[in-house]
Image: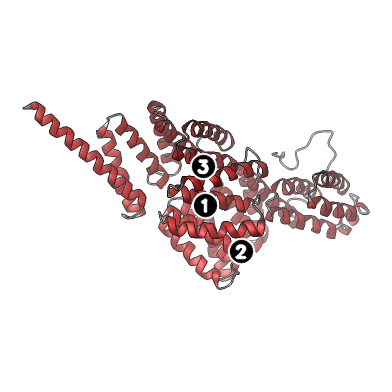
Amino acid sequence: MLRPPAGQRYMDEPPPSLRSLWYILRNLAGKYQGKGWSEGVKLQEIVSSIDSTASPEESKFESATDSLGLLDSLVKASLNDGRWDIAFEIASAMLDFYEFVKGEEDSRTMSAMNNLASAYWGLGQFDAAAILGIRVTNLRKRILGERDPHTLTSMSNLASAYRSQGKLEDAERLDARVVELKSQTLGAGHRSTLTSMMNLASSLSEQGKYKEAVALNRTLVEKAESILDATDPSMLTMKSNLASAYRDDGRFSLAQELDEEVLRVRRELLGSDHQLTLISIANLASTYRGQEKWTKAEHLDRELVQKAEETLGPKHPQTIMSFSNLASTCRGLGYLEEAKELGEKSSNAMSEILGKDHPQTLIVLADLAVTYQVNGNTEAAARLTAQVAELMKDSLGEEHPYTLSVKSNLGSIYQSQGEWNRAGDLAETVFYRRQELLGRNHPDTIAALEDMRRISWVEAADRNTARVLSK
C-alpha cells in the first residue's frame, strides 16, 4: 500500500488536477458504498459538490475550497475512527493534488502530508510514517515556527512513529520537547499538554523507566479527572496507560482494575471491533497472563486474534503480536504444539514486516525461544535466546527490563544443561540490575533472587558432594 514519492509518476500519467482528483474520489465513493460503508455516502456528497467546479483553472480551484475542506475533515474523522485504509486512500490523492497544484509549502499540502503520515502509522507502515513525518515536521518548523500548534502536532506524530520503530530515545527527546513547548504556550494543565505528557510517559515506559512512567501517568490521571468526563477518550487512554505502567511495575491487581474498566467502557462506546477496544483487550489479557489467569487470558486472546485479522488485516503488527500473545497463553495452558505453531508464525511475520532487529520482533522471538525450551528443544532455545540477548543489548540497552528477561531465560537454559557457573553469573547480573532498576519488591526482582539462591544451593551441594567423594 506504499505510494511513490510525490512528484514521481509515469511518463504517460497526466499531472494531478481537480478533475483527476474528482475521478479518484468518485471511484472511491462507489467502492465504499459497495461495501456498505457510511463514508461512501459522505464522500459521494463531496464529489457531487466538486462536480460543477472540476477544472484545473485557479479560479475554479478556489471555488472548490469548501468542498476540499470537507474532504480534509472526512480524512481526519477516518483517522479518529481508526479507518486507516480510507484515510490512506483519500489522503494520498489529496497530497498528490495539493503538492502539484499549490506546492509543498502550502498549508493544505502540509495538512495532507500529516494526515497521510498518520494513516501510514495506523496501517503499521512505521518507516513510511517516519519518513513523511520528518518531512512535514521540518517544513512546518521552517514556515510556521516550532511553537505553532500544527508544528507541535507533527512533532508529536513523528515521536509516535519513532516509538513504533523502536527508536525510543528519539521518541522521548521529541515528546519532552513537545511537552516543554505546550507547557509554555498553552499551560501545564491544558488538555493538549496532558496528551503530550501521556505520550512522554509511553516513551519512558517502553525504555523500561517504569517508576518514572507510573509517577507521570498517575499525575496525569489525577489532573485529567478534574477536567474530563470518565468516558472521555483521552481519559480512557490515560487510565489505560496507567494500567500498563502498573503492570510493568508488577502491580497487577491495580492494573487489572483499570484495564477491566477501560475495556468495558470502550466496548460500550466504540464497539468490540474498534482498534482502541482491541488494544484494551490485549492489555487486559496481558494483565491476566501476568497473574497466570490463563483461562481468562485465553478467552480474550482468541477473541483478539479473530477481530484483529478481520479489522486490521493479517500483516498489521498489532495482529501479529496478538498471535504471539496467544502463543504465550497456550504455553501456560500446556497447549505446547499450538504455542510452537503460533510462535513461529508470528516471529516470521514480524521479522518480515518490521525487520529482525526491531524490538517487537525480538520480543516475539524471545517468547518463541521459551516455547522451544518448554517443548524440550533446548539447543534451539539456547541458540535463539543468545541471539536475541545480543540484539536486545544493541537496540534497547544492556539494562532494559526486556534484555534482562532474555538473560534470565538464557540462565534457565544453562541450568537445564548443567552449566551452573554460566547460569550463576547471569543470575547475579540480572538480580542486581533488576534491584537497581525495578526495586527489590518487584516480582521480577524477587524471581531473580530466588533463581540466584537456587543456583547457589546447587553449587554448594555439588561442592559438598565433591568433598565427600574426595575423602
Give 374 or 24, whichever is nearer the viewer. Answer: 374
Mark 1 neighbour density, 10 Å: few (under 14) some (14–19) many (20 or more): many
**Furthest residue in direction front, as rendered:** 295
Q: Which mark is residue 284?
A: 1
Q: CA distance from mark 2 to mark 1?
A: 38 Å
Note whether 376 is above or below 100 in the view shown.
above
Question: Which one is in front in this view, the residue at disc 2 or the one at disc 1?
Answer: 1
Residue type, mark 2 in image: Arg
Q: Earlier in the sequence, mark 3 or mark 1?
A: 1
**Furthest residue in direction bottom, as rendered:** 226
Q: CA distance from mark 3 to mark 1?
A: 12 Å
Q: Which mark is residue 147?
A: 2
Residue labelled with disc 3: 325
Tell me how the rendering is colored: secondary structure
Q: Is there a contact, CB below 8 Å, between mark 3 and mark 2?
A: no
Q: Quadrant of the N terminus?
A: top right
Q: CA distance from mark 3 to mark 2?
A: 41 Å
Q: Residue at x 80, y 47 (%)?
A: 36
Q: Quadrant of the C terminus?
A: top left
